[in-house]
Image (cartoon, rainbow, N blue to C red):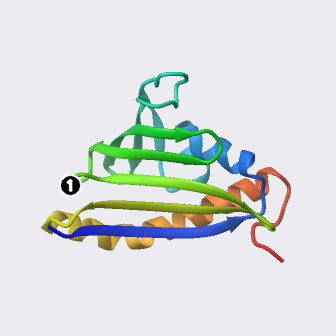
Amino acid sequence: MSRKHVEASAVARAAPEAVWALVADATSYPAWGRWEGAGYARGGDAASHGVGAVRWLRHGRRTITEEILELDDERRLAYTVVSGMPVRNYRGEVTLTPVADGTLIDWSATWDGTLAGRIVRRKLRTFFPDVVARLAAAAAEQTGQSPTPA
């Protein structure tokens, strides 16, 4: 079975620590993203948002539950969808890389290419770029920078 993949990138005019503060804490997602609500159903190993944490994100009538799989502090977060999306073997990853203008944000996901998985891909192809752009703008605003490189 083929795998489906979606990826979006943007440069935030902010230090990786500022972007990480927004990425690592799911409760901040409604402030900068397209979610109406977010929180934690279970804390992680070292912190509420650490490995093993189960977080929920509400967008419209859908609530998605995700589990944090890996965490490289201030650099990378990997997660899987537990429920709320008709996908199998979903793995999402947010990677932050310092660059001259700030921080390169790369948000990607792969999952099995089932019929429902193909439908999800169509939606995520527009959702991911919007979320990454909003994250970059929020991080820049938080640090008093203009959202896009000059």
In the foreground, 69 or 67:
69
Picture coordinates of residue 84 (x, y %)? Answer: 26, 46
* Residue 98 in which image quadrant: bottom right
* Residue 56 in which image quadrant: top left
Q: Which residue is situated farthest in the bottom direction here?
A: 150
- Identity of the residue drawn at 46% across and 53% down: 93
Picture coordinates of residue 64 (x, y %)? Answer: 33, 45
In the foreground, 33 or 94:
94
- Identity of the residue drawn at 57% across and 69% down: 9
> Is any atom of residue 72 visible in this view?
yes
> Is any atom of residue 28 visible in this view?
no
24 left or right, relative to 102: left
Picture coordinates of residue 26 (x, y %)? Answer: 52, 39
- Identity of the residue drawn at 39% across and 69% down: 6
| Residue linked to disc 1 | 86
Name the amino acid type tagged 1: Pro
Q: Secondary structure at mark 1?
A: loop
134 left or right, relative to 69: right
Picture coordinates of residue 96 (x, y %)? Answer: 63, 55
Q: Quadrant of the N terminus?
A: bottom left
97 left or right, relative to 147: left
